[in-house]
Every structure is written in structure tokens, then in C-alpha cells.
């Protein structure tokens, strides 16, 4: 099951990266560096969350739920800090659709991660 989780995260990373490379050519006003940075950060955080939660699966059910909540909070906090940093650095010319895509990246990784981790927990 570990290989499947990592495969899904890597596949998600590749698909989002391909979309961002296409978007770079089709609509250069999007902040390509910020989008790729957000994609990399969320992929790494998904794997870190996986490590945190799998350590909790063998314990009591409430420990698993606590692990999922902590990993989701960690990703949300890092995402908000990164987006605020991007907005403050590029204050005069922030591209708002890029900000919404960054939140979309967070949502996509969170949904995929929660779906896979809950399947793992039910299996054990």
C-alpha cells in the first residue's frame, strides 16, 4: 500500500507539473515559479503527512484521526505562509488567479491524501 500512495502522489505531481508547463506557454501571466513551488511543497508535505499518519495507524483509532488532522493542519499552515510570502514579495503585481490555483493545489493534494490514507486505515 505504501508504494501505491507514493505512486499516486508522484502521478499527481507529474500531471499538475504538465498542466503548469502548458499554462506557462498558453498564458504566461500566471506565476509559473510560484505554481511549481507550490506543487513541490505540497508533494513533499503529502509524503511527510503519510509518514506521520502511518505511524498512527497501528495505534488506537483516535490516534489515526489525530494524525490526519495534524497533517492537514500542517499542510494548510505551510500553504498559507507560502501564499502570504508570495503575495508580500510580489505586492504590486500579484496575479490573483495564480493564488486561487495555489489553493486548488492544496485541495487536490489534501483530497488525494485523505482518500488514500482512509483506505489504508480501513484495510488495517
Image: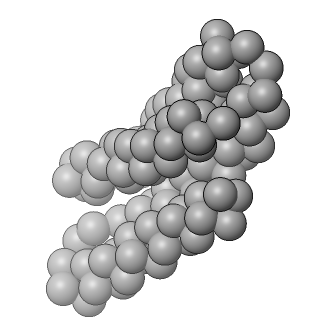
Toward the front, the furthest residue is 123
Q: Is residue 62 left or right of residue 106?
A: right
Q: At 23% across and 71% down in the image, what residue appears?
A: 29
Which quadrant does the N terminus fall into?
bottom right
111 to the left or right of 8: left
Estimate the x, y position of residue 98 in percent, counting from the top left.
28, 56
Q: Is residue 32 visible?
A: no
Asked if residue 23 lies left or right of residue 79, the reply is left
Q: Position of residue 11 (x, y in %)?
A: 49, 73
Q: Residue at x 45, y 67 (%)?
A: 12
In the rendered view, tell whether residue 29 sits above or below residue 39.
below
| Residue depicted at 19% across the width and 78% down the height | 27
| Residue at image location 59% in from the left, 18% down from the top | 65
- In this picture, residue 66 sits left or right of residue 106: right
Residue 67 in view of the camera: yes
In this rendered view, identify the residue nearer to me: 105 or 116: 116
Above or below for 10 versus 69: below
Task: Give the x, y percent position of residue 46.
Answer: 60, 48
Placement of 84 over or under 99, stated as above or below: above
Task: Classify the position of the C terminus by image quarter.
Answer: top right
Amino acid at each position: 500500500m505504501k508504494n501505491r500512495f507514493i505512486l499516486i502522489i508522484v502521478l499527481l505531481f507529474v500531471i499538475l507539473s504538465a498542466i503548469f508547463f502548458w499554462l506557462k506557454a498558453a498564458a504566461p501571466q500566471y506565476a509559473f515559479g510560484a505554481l511549481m513551488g507550490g506543487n513541490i511543497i505540497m508533494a513533499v508535505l503529502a509524503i511527510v503527512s503519510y509518514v506521520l499518519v502511518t505511524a498512527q495507524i497501528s495505534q488506537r483509532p483516535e490516534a489515526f484521526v489525530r494524525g490526519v488532522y495534524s497533517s492537514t493542519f500542517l499542510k494548510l499552515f505551510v500553504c498559507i505562509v507560502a501564499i502570504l510570502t508570495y503575495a508580500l514579495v510580489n505586492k504590486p503585481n500579484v496575479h490573483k488567479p495564480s493564488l486561487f490555483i495555489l489553493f486548488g493545489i492544496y485541495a487536490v493534494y489534501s483530497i488525494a491524501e485523505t482518500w488514500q490514507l482512509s483506505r489504508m486505515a480501513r484495510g488495517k
